[in-house]
Image: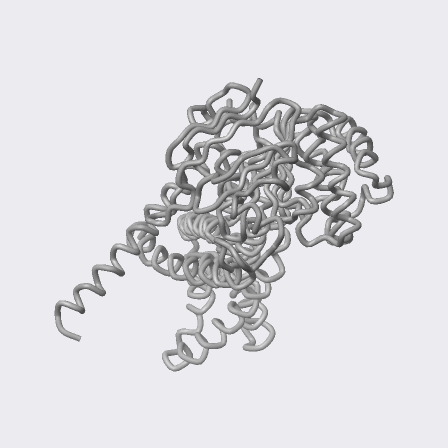
Amino acid sequence: MNFYDFLTVVGKVFLKFLRATGNIAIFLFRSLLTGLTPPYYWKQIAIQTIQIGYYSLPVVGLTALFTGMAMTLQCYDGFSNFTSEGAIPSVVMIAMTRELGPVLASLMVAGRLGASMTAEIGTMKVTEQIDALSSLSVNPYKYLVFPRIITGTLLMPFLVFIDDIIGILGGYLVGVYHLGFNSANYIHNTFVSMSAWDVCSGLIKGAAFGFVICLMGCYQGFSSTKGAEGVGRSTTNSVVSSSIIILLLDGILTFVLF
Amino acid sequence: MYVIEVNNLTKSFGSNKVITGVSLKLKKGTSYVIIGGSGSGKSVLLKSIIGILKPTSGSVKINGNELTNLNQKDRDKLMLKCGILFQGGALFDSLTVADNIGFGLVYGFGFSKKQAREIAIEKLHDVNLKDDVLEKYPSELSGGMQKRVALARAIATSPDIIFFDEPTTGLDPITSGMINELIVKFTKEMGISALSITHDINSLKHISDRVGLLFGGKIIWEGDNKDLWTTDNPYVKQFVTGSLVGPFTA
């Protein structure tokens, strides 16, 4: 491959990226424009609240619990070399609220919810159910996309908050019942260095990640091509693209917020 | 009076020209059937007429309203006067039969769920189905029953025009016959105008008043049902006889 061919490939990839970005922006604009005008489909918002908020709790809770436990054990292993075990509760708290809580909860939700969202909408697309919605005078962006995006954005901070609590609790359980920390000291050390901004920054990240998961889940579903293979490909694309954007956005937001 | 007037409609996907200039007119209370081979662009034409696909150029008038110029709100209002039976039924998987049939009534006309359910029962009887399927989900029904439920949904809003996208595809001959009978019942007895696409000759024989043959993105032959069997047009002759010899190639 000569330099010209290399530039051609780079150019094609860049144009493809620009086209995809433009399509996503148009998709989002159309969804928000139609969704913000009446009538509002409250029942769809209620259904998505249960789907996103309630059914994601087990997977988010389990991830947080074991992450908090593992984090405490790993910190103990390192910190004990410098007799700094007292800092473990604070480190676990900061790590969970600022970083691990929002990122891990969002990655788990992207895997669970983003995939199911894309598969559901993608199947509707290839079986003409989305066309049927239009034919019954119901805007599919308003009925399918807006309730998911708005609910995902508003509920993800709630999931992150639960994740923070369970993660810190996991650390407490290992610290007190396995490593022999004094319970009162552990709790005191956890909260003494906690600031509201630690928690709020994680919640802001959660809202941004929830928005990304639902936007990509719906967009990939609407982009599904014919057949089971097309829906499968879109589902994979949804999870992969959401996860990459979450990690990228996490870096950007950390720079901006701290 | 014409309820649908299509003039020089074209539809392209990138450089791929699927519909290259279709014109047709549907008289009130009659049934127009578009025939054509697989891949001839029948579904694309139908979706372009309904407005699900945006035509590249040309004009589509439904009840005198230029569809391509209407804003979303007016288009939605106009579509409430139209019913569509999709090829695979396109019933909503997550909703029961009652909710599927009443969907347009609740979301389009603002009916209460109770009112929509009463109409759903009535329409279910119109398509020869009993009340016991009301609470079932589409996945619990046979292909023929799904098609009839989809038909009930299409007529639930008492439309002036119904569009049928290959109404008998994938059905056994008896169920196909039943669907054909229902289509005739709706067009002849209820005075609903119908625009259909099909490649099922038996269906064509029963449900059409006027027929157009789509080939190469254009209607290359148009005539009444009776002309279909007597014409010398080689395309039509080959299509209705299913012969391997002629201008159509597989």
Q: Quadrant location of residue A240?
A: bottom left
Q: Is residue B58 above or below residue A76?
A: above
Give coordinates of residue B243: x percent, y percent.
Answer: 59, 57
User: Total label count?
Assistant: 0
Which residue is situated farthest in the left direction here? A3
Q: Residue at x 68, y 54 (%)?
A: B170
Q: Nearer the viewer, residue A17 or B173?
A: B173
Q: Nearer the viewer, residue B239 or A217?
A: B239
Q: Residue at x 43, y 42 (%)?
A: B19
The answer to whether any part of residue B184 appears in the image is yes
Give coordinates of residue A196: x percent, y percent.
Answer: 43, 48
Q: Residue at x 53, y 44 (%)?
A: B43
Q: Is residue B100 above or below residue A13?
A: above
Q: Nearer the viewer, residue A216 or B63?
A: B63
The answer to whether any part of residue A203 appears in the image is no
What is the image's colouring? one colour
Q: Is residue B46 above or below residue A50?
A: above
**In this rendering, position of residue A98 left or right of residue B224:** left
Q: Residue at x 45, y 24 (%)?
A: B70
Q: Quadrant of the N terminus of chain B?
A: top right
Give coordinates of residue B108: x percent, y percent.
Answer: 62, 27
Q: Is residue B237 above or below residue B22?
A: below
Q: Quadrant location of residue A1?
A: bottom left
Give coordinates of residue B90: x percent, y percent.
Answer: 64, 46
Q: Nearer the viewer, residue A177 or A223?
A: A223
**In this rendering, position of residue A85 left or right of residue A118:** left
